[in-house]
Amino acid sequence: MSSDAAIDPGISGQAAPDAHEQRAFGFWLYLMSDAIIFALLFATFAVMVNNTAGGPAGKDVFSLSSTFAETMLLLFSSLTFGLATLATKAEKSGRVLAWLCVTFLLGLGFIGLEIREFADMVEAGAGPDRSGFLSAFFTLVGTHGLHVSFGLIWILIMACQIAVKGLSVPVVSRLSRLGLFWHFLDIVWIGIFSVVYLPGIL
Amino acid sequence: MATTTPEDRHGLRSYLTGFALALILTLIPFGLVATGVLSKTPILVVIAIAAIVQFLVHLRYFLHLDLTTTPRERVFAIAFTIILIFIMVGGSLWIMLDLYNRMMV
């Protein structure tokens, strides 16, 4: 409460809920610009997908079971983050922490699978330097993985803030933006498995 | 769960509905690719439709985007973003595929 109230009146003369709404809108605009970045990486991938330069194509390097496991981990983590959001509304900080921990572990599992997949590909001679197709693949999927990694760090930070400060107004406000970020990343993943993995494996 | 208010239950139902729909819309394309019961083009069409519907499901049930309750400027921002994406992605693909057809085929 205090930090919101301290910053806001000087700027707009309005109370804390408006400050939260302004920040939510600012973060929403950031997500929209991020969506444009991802859309252009998708366009790059679509242009490059057949430029394999005699190297491996999608069906040689992608695994359906691993992709399915990654998809399920992210989808479940979206649900568990939703349950954390509901626990926030019910002001039960213990339950919020528990669901954030589950979300963190699911996200960590996703990143673990992705790192293993990337390492296997590089070891098999299908690294980003092999062909235009693989450069575009690693840029697109790697950018998403980097976002998820930052999301994991953010979840840890928020868990610490809840443990120390409790569910204060600024903490709840930040949690809502983390929720937007996390659900947004799951939406980007729908695009990745529908544009990159499934057509590649077909 | 004795202390949950009706609003909580509504929220929980919303998340669970979204999750169930997303799960179905994920299982359909993965199942088709795994079993290969259709030929390639129909499977690609199903993948595209399932992805678009699942995108809308996520917006509605996870991001709670609602044309009546969501602040107007957020709806404008996402509409503007979708227009930009259509222009930039559509334009890039149009130019590059046209170039490919003129030079490589």
Image: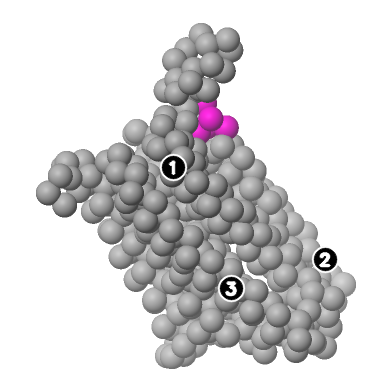
Q: Secondary structure at mark 3?
A: helix
Q: Which residue is mark 1?
A: A162
* A108 left or right of A90 in image: right
Quarter holding the N terminus of chain A? top left
**Mark 2 neighbour class, 10 Å CA radius: few under 14, some 14 to 19, many 20 or more:** few
Label 2: chain letter: B
Q: Secondary structure at mark 1?
A: helix
Label 3: chain letter: A
The nearer-to-camera label among 2 and 1 is: 1
Hey, what amino acid is under mark 3? Gly
Who's the residue at 79% across and 74% down the image?
A128
| Range of magenta residues | A22-26
Hey, what amino acid is under mark 2? Leu
- Mark count: 3
Instruction: Single out the residue that lies furthest toward the left.
Output: B2
Who's the residue at 40% across and 65% down the image?
A76
User: Where's residue A91, x and y in %?
Assistant: 30, 39
Q: Which residue is mark 3?
A: A112
Q: Which residue is mark 2?
A: B99
* B87 left or right of A105 in image: right
Residue B24 is a magenta residue = no
- The answer to whether tags 3 and 1 share a subunit is yes
Q: Secondary structure at mark 2?
A: helix
User: Where's residue A104, x and y in %?
Assistant: 48, 60
Q: Is residue B4 above or below residue A42?
A: above
Question: Residue B90, can we see it?
Answer: no
Instruction: Single out the residue that lies furthest toward the right.
Output: B103
User: Where's residue A131, x and y in %?
Assistant: 82, 78
Question: Residue A92, can we see it?
Answer: yes
Q: Main secondary structure of the magenta part?
A: helix
The nearer-to-camera label among 3 and 1 is: 1
